Image (cartoon, helix red, strand yellow):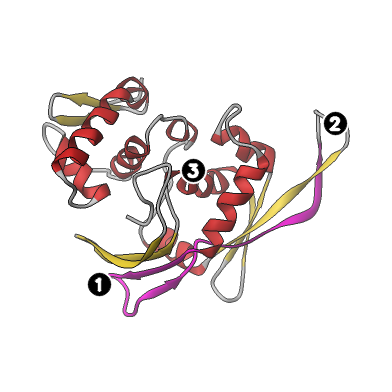
Amino acid sequence: MLYQPSQRPFLREGNWNYTSFGRCRVTGRLGQRHADVVEAVLYCAERRRDVSDGGIELLVDPARVRKTLSDSRYSFTHIEKLVAELRAATITIETPQFDSPIIGGLIDHLIPSPMTRRDPLTGGERNLWRVRLGVALVMLLENDLRLYYDPAPIARLQHGISQAVARHLLSHKKVPIGGWHLDTVIVAVAGTVTSKAMRNARFRLREDADELKLLGLVLDGQRVKKTTPA
């Protein structure tokens, strides 16, 4: 629940969210568009360098990040705004897996790299990015969070709840017999919601049903089943 199941997240002030893994809180604004950027940076990284304080610095081609996010929807200005909000958000995670709380951010900084690449649009050169991952994200990557899928199809889903559900289910290796109960999955990513919000979530998931099927997630009545991606 680090990321709200919305493409238009509200500003959170540090209320705890509880899951079966522990609890977490976010002070700041983190939604599914922010998750798009983080996953695109991780997926497009060309090199990595471990930093002495536990962080990681990645070398990333911004053109590849933008192409992963969207064919046309994301401008570099929009990406920079999302990165600024990622940097500003403070995350606290408490789980039995760790002896003490994790307090930190997801991205510490993004700066131009001296390395360049030819820009086919202008004929000139463009700088690559050096993206410093925050210690909180590094610890999640080392202990729990893994990216096993191409984030591009998720970034193209119409609704934030669909993106959140897809990310949640694709992170599971074990699938329950008969699939997951739809309402249970919605609560897993959104928390306890009103009956109206639950109906809206079901409706939006069904609007994205064809795109979810391409990811190997099939809506079947009140259940979600995992199949081979279409």
Spot occupied by residue 58 in the image (x, y as percentages of width and height): 63, 55
* 3 or 1: tag closer to the N-terminus: 3
Dot 2 surroundings within 10 Å: few (below 14), some, or many (20 or more)? few
Q: How far apart are marks 3 and 2 (CA)?
A: 27 Å
Residue toward you, 2 or 11? 11
Q: Which of 79 and 9 is in front in this view?
A: 9
Specify start and end residues of the magenta stretch as a single range.
89-118
Q: Which of marks 3 and 2 is nearer the N terminus?
A: 3
Name the quadrant of the N terminus. Answer: bottom left
- Which residue in the rendered view is the most extreme toward the right? 124
Image quadrant of residue 174? top left
Q: Which residue position holds label 1?
A: 96
- Looking at the picture, which amino acid does disc 1 mark? Pro
The residue drawn where x is 81% and y is 46% is 116
Residue 219, position as x, y percentages in the image: 22, 25
Residue 172 shown left or right of residue 39 in the figure: left
Marks 2 and 1, how far apart at CA: 52 Å
Which marked residue is nearer to the observer: mark 2 or mark 1? 2
Q: How many labels does the image show?
A: 3
User: Which residue corresponds to the image point at 59% horizontal and 27% vertical from the top-left?
Assistant: 71
* Three-letter residue code for mark 2: Thr
Secondary structure, magenta segment, majority class: strand
Q: Mark 3 points at which residue?
A: 36
Instruction: State how far apart marks 3 and 1 are (Cα).
Output: 28 Å
